[in-house]
Image (cartoon, rainbow, N blue to C red):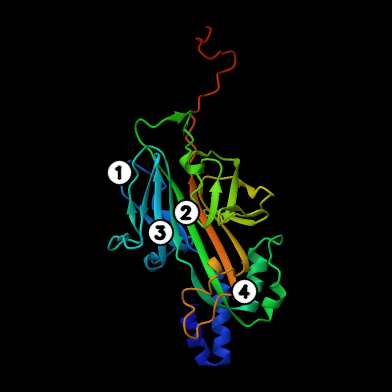
Amino acid sequence: MTARHARRAARLGGAWAAWWLAAAAANAQTVLFITPEQPEVAVAQPVVIAAEHAPGQRVQWPADRLAWMFVRNAGGQRNFEPATPLADPGKPGPSITLDGLDAAMVGVELAPRDEVLDGKALAAWARENISPHKLPDGLDKLEGAGPVTVRRVESAKAFLRARGEGEQRRGNRPTRSATATDKSGQAVEIRPLFDVTAATTPTDIPVRMYAFGDGAKRALLRVVHVPTGEEQRLIADDKAIAFVRLEHPGMYRLEFHALAPFTPPDGGGGGEEAAGDAPKATWTLLTGTATFTVPQQPQVPQHPEPAKGERVGEEKRR
């Protein structure tokens, strides 16, 4: 709920206002994921990047909230400013192309915004979605604080791959790409340290988390394998790394959150919306997400077992 909506809720009266604030806090975990419509495309083939909250639950592309977007592929990066018309008419998001046979990283950064949430509901959400090692001081006070203004900082990224004739391969899979393991520089970042677009299952991959450029030590990483719904809840180590188990091919969705008392940038006041009678932010909620699809494993040709007394490569003795 924005500060403007908070003023409206207050005018509705106590019961309605309390319900609205609690609902907003419960939806704090309704975060943005971005997903390519195809995880593998040909060079220069357009692919749409869609926005989702839950698997299959597409939402409108957040053009009005977008701070910037980038596409990194084949040693280069294209940046898109908010004024750039990204979404094609009739499509759920922007259409991009890849320049080379390589992995690609697509990322978006949403402009920070202030929301008014119910303190008790936000505290309960934090205990469920934030590492017990990273719960902030003052969480008990938050439970009795009533409405609180929270600064939301959100980043999202997705991985895909351009494939085709001439692709460098290592056995039955493409060569690992440095693009897929690059640090993006987003405010909140989930960074695989292994090329997930060239992974085979089953395997474990290291993933590092960052908040404002620093490693998010002991953070909670939530991982969901979309086709099966299997979930992993992993605590990062002191290097901010968690090891994700890739048991099956298919799409994976990763997210992590951090909550802390609000610190004004450069010593300033509250959020951009903190004008007039709007409350100023007292908490900051950071959210980072990532999606990728582990490719199906290539079929290995099956050779019939040799008959008894027969050797492979030799004619059967008569």
Q: Which mark is nearer the camera, 3 or 2?
A: 3
Residue at the extreme top of the image, as rendered: 318
Nearest to N terminus: mark 2 or mark 4 = 4
- Residue 317 image point, x, y percent: 53, 7
Amino acid found under the numbered disc labelled 2? Lys
Amino acid found under the numbered disc labelled 1? Ala
State the CA–CA distance, disc 1 to disc 4. Answer: 44 Å
Whether residue 30 is visible to the viewer of this picture, yes or no, is: no
Dots 1, 4 in contact, CB < 8 A:
no
Q: What residue appears at the point 56 percent right and 42 percent down from the top-left corner?
A: 193
Nearest to N terminus: mark 4 or mark 3 = 3
- Say what secondary structure mark 4 lies in: helix
Vertical placement of residue 209 versus 196, above or below: below
As drawn, the label of residue 122 is: 4
Amino acid found under the numbered disc labelled 3? Trp
Dots 1, 2 in contact, CB < 8 A:
no
Q: What residue appears at the point 50 percent right and 28 percent down from the top-left corner?
A: 302
Disc 1: CA contacts within 10 A as few (<14), some (14-19) or many (>=20): few
Q: What residue appears at the point 65 percent right and 63 percent down from the top-left corner?
A: 130
- Say what secondary structure mark 3 lies in: strand
Disc 4: CA contacts within 10 A as few (<14), some (14-19) or many (>=20): many
Name the residue nearer the viewer: 275 or 97.
275
Q: Is residue 275 left or right of residue 86?
A: right
State the CA–CA distance, disc 2 to disc 4. Answer: 25 Å
Q: What residue appears at the point 65 percent right and 81 percent down from the top-left corner?
A: 145
Residue of label 3: 68
Residue of label 2: 157
